[in-house]
Structure formats: C-alpha cells, structure tokens
Image: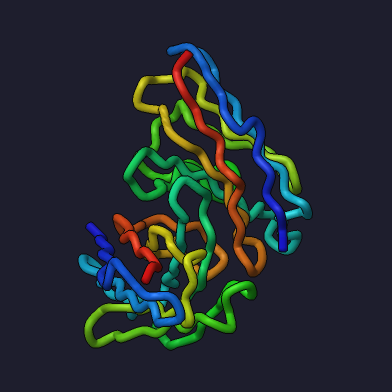
C-alpha cells in the first residue's frame, strides 16, 4: 500500500496569514504516460463529509476559492491557503488514487491562532 | 445538482452483515463517465477507501477488506450497495458513498452526508 504521511498533525495560523500543509507519499503517484499526479486534497468540517478542494495535485475544483492552491510532484505535495479565513477551520486530508488501495493521509487539523 | 444519500441500519450485531444502500439523484448511475465508491471513517479517525464500482458491475476492493466486502449496483433504481460480513466492533464508522470525478482512478467529487453504523450486541 502507498502510505500517505501529512505534516504537521495540527496547525494554528492567524487570520489572514498563510497556512501550509504537507503530504508525502511512500512511492511516486506521478503517472509517466500522462504526466499527472494522482493526488487530491479534501477539507472536512465537523459533522460534514469531506469536500474536494484540489485534484491532480494542483487543479482547483470548481467553486473552491482561489486562496487554496496545491503544488508538488512525485512524492511530495503541499496544500497552501494564502490568507486564512475563519471558515477554513477544518481537518484537511490528502489522498492518492494512483493505485489500489486508494489511501488517505492521517489528516491535519487547522485552527485559528 | 447531484446528490447521494446513504441508508441502512445504524446498529449491527457482531458477526452479522452490514448492508447499506446509496441512492443517487440528479444524475444517472449508468453514466459511462463515472465510477462510484464507498469510504468509511471510524469516530474521530481518518478515512479508509472500501471499494469502487462501475455501472457495468466491475468492482475494485481494498485488499484489507476484500474477503468480507461486496459492492453491487442496481441501475434500475439508480443505487449501489455495500455489504460487509462478518462485522466486528472495528467496523464501527461513518460510511460514506461518493462519486469518482471520472474513472476509478480519480478523486471523489460528490459525497453523501454519511451514515453512522455501530457494531454492538
């Protein structure tokens, strides 16, 4: 199985400041034939299902604010929130869908400082 | 707007079968463009992919659960289902159904609200 490891486990950031969450996969999720990284980011608020923010490592889902961005390739990925808003408080998960079983990171809890 | 809704018993006894159905509305489960999946989340913990199905019936399962899981599709009712047997307390979780954005190797873009299933005698 591909193990997805997120860092940090929790993060406190001031409103308006930048938040950065990292995700490392135990093997590459870059498919060479199409040069796509099979990596997604989700946001989960309490008592809600996860919401897709980013897929293919850097493609923002329709309707997701442009303060959210994804970057990275191969085994190292980053989710950046450029200017933290109060409504961004949530747990964030990365997921690889490169191979079976699809696997998720353990989650990063983002709070307001 | 596509909507997914999980339904089924909220309490299952150990060694018995967990059965859930996901009803899709606002779109056809028979669309050749999408695959459909089940994901679970134990209380206070992370997400685990259970398996994925295509409208044709092709399935992909998590090897850790494969011996106990069956996912099926009912195109006439626009539903797909999850059976997990036998269950233990470790199967207590919120179970989500979701749509892959395209193939089985794509992210989940639409999710149901989830249903809590507790395994207890």
Residue B54 in sight in this render: no
Describe residue B38's horizontal placement relative to residue B116 as left or right. Answer: right
Describe residue B86's horizontal placement relative to residue B119 as left or right. Answer: right
* Residue B100 location (% of width, % of height): 45, 64
Closest to the observer, B1 or B83: B83
The part of the image, by quadrant, that contains residue B24 is: bottom left
* Residue A41 location (% of width, % of height): 53, 44
Question: Which residue is at 49% across, 28% downward?
Answer: A110
* Residue B80 location (% of width, % of height): 34, 78
Question: Which residue is at 71% across, 54% downward?
Answer: A3
Residue B108 in sight in this render: yes
The part of the image, by quadrant, that contains residue A107 is: top right
Closest to the observer, B24 or B8: B8
Name the colouring of the figure: rainbow
Tell me the quarter of the image containing the N terminus of chain A.
bottom right
Pick out the residue farthest to the front: B121
Pick out the residue farthest to the right: A27
In the depicted structure, whether residue A64 falls above or below residue B89: above
Question: Which residue is at 39% across, 20% downward?
Answer: A85
The part of the image, by quadrant, that contains residue B9 is: bottom left
Question: Which residue is at 35% across, 64% downward?
Answer: B117
Closest to the observer, A108 or A99: A108
In the depicted structure, whether residue B48 falls above or below residue A65: below
Q: How many marks?
A: 0
């Amino acid at each position: 199985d591909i193990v997805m490891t997120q860092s940090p486990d929790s993060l406190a950031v001031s409103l308006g400041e930048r938040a950065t969450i990292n995700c490392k996969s135990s093997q590459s999720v870059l498919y060479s034939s199409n040069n796509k990284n099979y990596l997604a980011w989700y946001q989960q608020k309490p008592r809600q299902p996860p919401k897709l923010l980013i897929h293919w490592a850097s493609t923002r889902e329709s309707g997701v604010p442009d303060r959210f961005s994804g970057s990275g390739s191969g085994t190292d990925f980053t989710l950046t929130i450029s200017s933290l808003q109060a409504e961004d408080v949530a747990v964030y998960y990365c997921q690889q869908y490169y191979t079976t079983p699809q696997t998720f990171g353990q989650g990063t809890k983002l709070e307001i400082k | 707007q596509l909507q997914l809704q999980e339904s089924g018993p909220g309490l299952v006894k150990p060694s018995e079968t967990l059965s859930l159905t996901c009803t899709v509305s606002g779109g056809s489960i028979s669309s050749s463009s999408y695959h459909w999946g089940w994901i679970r989340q134990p209380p206070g913990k992370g997400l685990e992919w259970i398996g994925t199905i295509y409208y044709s019936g092709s399935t992909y399962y998590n090897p850790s659960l494969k011996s106990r899981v069956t996912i099926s599709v009912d195109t006439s009712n626009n539903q797909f289902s999850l059976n997990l047997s036998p269950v233990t307390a470790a199967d207590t979780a919120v179970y989500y159904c979701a749509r892959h954005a395209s193939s089985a190797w794509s992210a989940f873009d639409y999710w149901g609200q989830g249903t809590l299933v507790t395994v207890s005698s």
